[in-house]
Image (cartoon, rainbow, N blue to C red):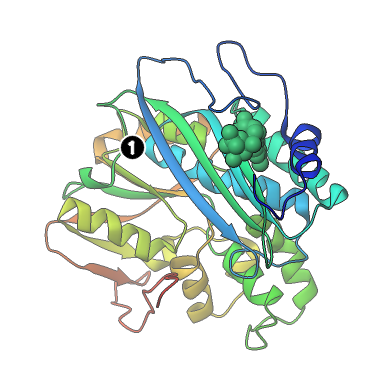
């Protein structure tokens, strides 16, 4: 207990907003530790911090924030082909705002329920400035069945799920970037905002890709940067056709340079990028359609190191800014 927290306040808050009956076989909120059952699998663990002013705007819809705080973590499980088991929540709050907390919890629990991933514990404290949210998820995956970054092989197809670029366009519009070349900013924001605030983690697709994909990553910092992590881990290179990368109508309407920038370097996407051998094309397409995901082939893994981005005619696009998001750049 910290001196600046009123006991009734902290524990009442946890009881009101974050305590639900423990799922069968688990010990959840209320004891010193949660207890998770032995699944016979490896435990996949991932954690993400979301900081007000850096990862979200102070006035964001708290339901969307609750959703996204869990979604970005579930997306990491998806990238490994792990099945969500449970999660814990760390919260630092400048004050207790019940309406805000209730909406935040609603958004978070709706996604948790959809993935059968209960909240089993956490920590709550007062912050001196702004809201900080830390979520840690646990998932189950057969130890030798996890999708890794390191498995790509020359000749593999490179695939991505979803249209890319919407979240980046929405972020630019919300940030008041006046250079964005759209005629109707309100319409463009209305068309893209959902991708930024309500990303849908591709958990089912990740599970379906077990035994099929050679390597996978979720796109959080931009396609080219995240694909670069697969290439570095796998010790190979790639050729990507920029104009094959799937985009929405809103991103497609941008001038080519902007379209490519949003689709190839835009972050906050939470779609999967993965590689698979050409003989698995039909099975990849089936896995995607079974799980309601759209997947597109955008290039090929090559033995020569480096990432070669070309346009629809095969001409190199050297001027493309490859860098995605880097907090310390
Ligand atoms: P301890 O002091 O033993 O770490 P706490 O007093 O911090 O325990 O928390 C009491 C209980 O409430 C614990 O079971 C903890 O996991 C849970 N808890 C605290 N904050 C949260 C939260 N934000 N979400 C879910 N559970 C929480
Ligand atoms: Mg504690």
| Residue 176 at x, y percent in the picture | 70, 82
Q: Residue 312: image x %, image y %?
A: 38, 69
What residue sits 52% from the left and 71% below the top?
262
Name the residue: 67% across, 66% down.
Answer: 128
Q: Please, what secondary structure does the residue beneath circle 1 have?
A: helix
Residue that mark 1 sits on: 281
Above or below: residue 142 compared with residue 304: above
| Relative image position of residue 302 (x, y in whole percent) | 17, 57
Q: Nearer the viewer, residue 145 or 19?
A: 19
Quadrant including the C terminus: bottom left
Report x, y in % for residue 66.
Answer: 69, 47
- Mark 1 residue CB less than 8 A from any atom of ligand 1: no
Residue 95 drawn above or below residue 113: below
> Is 137 on the left-hand or right-hand side of 42?
right
At x 53%, y 27%, the residue is: 33
- The quarter holding residue 11 reads top right
Which residue is depicted at the point 29% across and 34% down? Answer: 280
- Ligand 1 - quadrant of the structure image: top right
In the rendered image, the residue lying farthest to the left is 304
Is 13 on the left-hand or right-hand side of 289?
right
Closer to us: 326 or 231: 326
């Amino acid at each position: 207990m910290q001196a600046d927290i009123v006991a009734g306040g902290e524990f009442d808050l946890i009881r009101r907003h974050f305590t639900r009956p423990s799922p069968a076989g688990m010990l959840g909120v209320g004891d010193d530790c949660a207890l998770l059952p032995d699944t016979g699998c490896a435990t996949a663990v991932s954690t993400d911090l979301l900081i007000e002013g850096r990862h979200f705007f102070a006035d964001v819809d708290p339901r969307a924030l609750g959703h996204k705080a869990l979604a970005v973590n579930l997306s990491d499980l998806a990238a490994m082909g792990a099945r969500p088991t449970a999660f814990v929540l760390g919260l630092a709050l400048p004050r207790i705002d019940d309406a805000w907390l209730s909406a935040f919890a609603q958004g978070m629990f709706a996604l948790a329920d959809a993935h059968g991933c209960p909240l089993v514990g956490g920590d709550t404290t007062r912050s001196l400035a702004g809201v900080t949210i830390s979520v840690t998820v646990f998932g189950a995956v057969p130890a030798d069945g996890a999708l890794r970054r390191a498995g790509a092989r020359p000749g593999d197809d490179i695939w991505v799920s979803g249209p890319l670029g919407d979240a980046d366009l929405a972020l630019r519009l919300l940030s008041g970037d006046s250079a964005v070349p759209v005629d109707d900013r309100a319409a463009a924001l209305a068309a893209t905002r959902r991708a930024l605030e309500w990303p849908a983690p591709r958990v089912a697709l990740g599970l379906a890709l077990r035994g099929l994909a050679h390597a996978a990553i979720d796109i959080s910092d931009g396609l080219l940067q995240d694909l670069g992590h697969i290439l570095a881990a796998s010790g190979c290179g790639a050729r990507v056709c920029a104009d094959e990368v799937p985009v929405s109508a809103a991103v497609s309407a941008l001038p080519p340079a902007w379209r490519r920038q949003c689709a190839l370097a835009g972050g906050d996407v939470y779609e999967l990028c993965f590689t698979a051998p050409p003989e698995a094309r039909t099975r990849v397409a089936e896995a995607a359609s079974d799980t309601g995901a759209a997947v597109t082939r955008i290039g090929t893994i090559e033995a020569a190191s480096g990432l070669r981005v070309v346009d629809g005619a095969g001409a190199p696009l050297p001027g493309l800014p490859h860098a995605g998001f880097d907090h310390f750049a």
